[in-house]
Amino acid sequence: MSKKDSQFQKFSMSLIYRGKEIFKPLNTGRIDEHVACIREWIANIFFYTKNGTTIMIDAGYNYDRLKEKMGWLDIDPASIKHILITHQDTDHVGALEVDSERLFRDAAIYLSEIENRYLTGEVRRKVMFGLYKLPLVKTDNPKVLLKDGQALDIDGIRIEAILVPGHTWGHMVYLIDDRYLFTGDTIWFGADGGYSFINALAEDNDLAKRSLAELEGKLRSRGLTPMIITGHTGWTDDLDFAFAHRNEVCNSFRKQTPHDPKAPYDGYDESDDTEMKARTVRLEKQDMRK
């Protein structure tokens, strides 16, 4: 999204969602030796590193501090040649906008062929139960369009793209090396487990819930228990926690129940996101509260 649109969303969504415990972004830092995270207001973007190659997952807002925070993690923007896009919402692709800093101008972006219809303008992204159209994203990065179940190998990193429509029509999650599942806006973690993501932001909530249940089924049928890493509410390696409320949706109009004391009052307040923490504190997982 344009810088102007990013700033408008920061202002409007802070007013709408503060105090409701909806967004619980991870601070900038590392989950483990392979996965690093950057916080951009309420959103997280991720970097997966193996064999000397770093792949980026989602591209956040059109955000002025991205290069600074990448420096906290000793990641050079020029080293990023591959970016996996879960979906084209404006808080997941902003760093690719033509009026951004263009830190990743040489990177190829990977997204589902269905999701690409938003970027071409064939379909407009609607939120707030279809009442509001998001601004059209404009990018000139080269694109690799993916089908459901397609597998990629990038420098020995195995990536499986899985279609999970509902939040957007072409939303994908990415299973990397069978150990890490980057879910974008498929799952919202509450204090008592995972739900389908925020109701007001989905194209089709019923479809989103079905996709979530199917995703769980695919993982369990293959005996996989990856780290499940979300775009706004942290991560877990507990499948029972992650899919505890797969048939329910996060309600954006009320304070969340049960109350989560770890949720910030305003997710757009980044005062606790510091370089010292980024370099010294590992990012803890979400756990079921007893």
Image: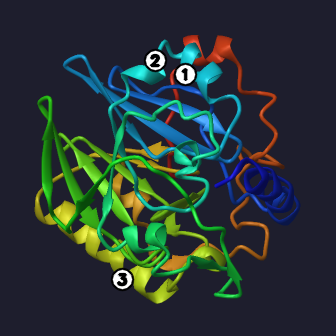
Residue 178: give x, y in percent of width and height: 18, 45
Q: Quadrant of the N terminus?
A: bottom right
Position of residue 71 relative to residue 183, above or below, is: above
Q: CA distance from mark 2 to mark 1?
A: 5 Å
Residue at 29 percent of width and 52 percent of height: 174
Residue picked out by circle 2: 75
In primary-sequence order, the first of circles 2 and 1 is 1
Position of residue 275 relative to residue 171, above or below, is: above
Q: Is residue 175 left or right of residue 275?
A: left
Helix, strand or loop for disc 1: helix
In primary-sequence order, the first of circles 3 and 1 is 1
**Render colour scheme:** rainbow
Could you tell me if the residues under marks 2 and 1 are in contact, i.e. CB atoms within 8 Å? yes
Q: Label 3 neighbourhood size at 10 Å, few (<14), some (14-19), many (20+)?
A: some
Residue at 23 percent of width and 62 percent of height: 146
Q: Is residue 203 left or right of residue 269?
A: left
Residue picked out by circle 3: 210
In primary-sequence order, the first of circles 3 and 2 is 2
Residue 71: give x, y in percent of width and height: 56, 15
Residue picked out by circle 1: 70
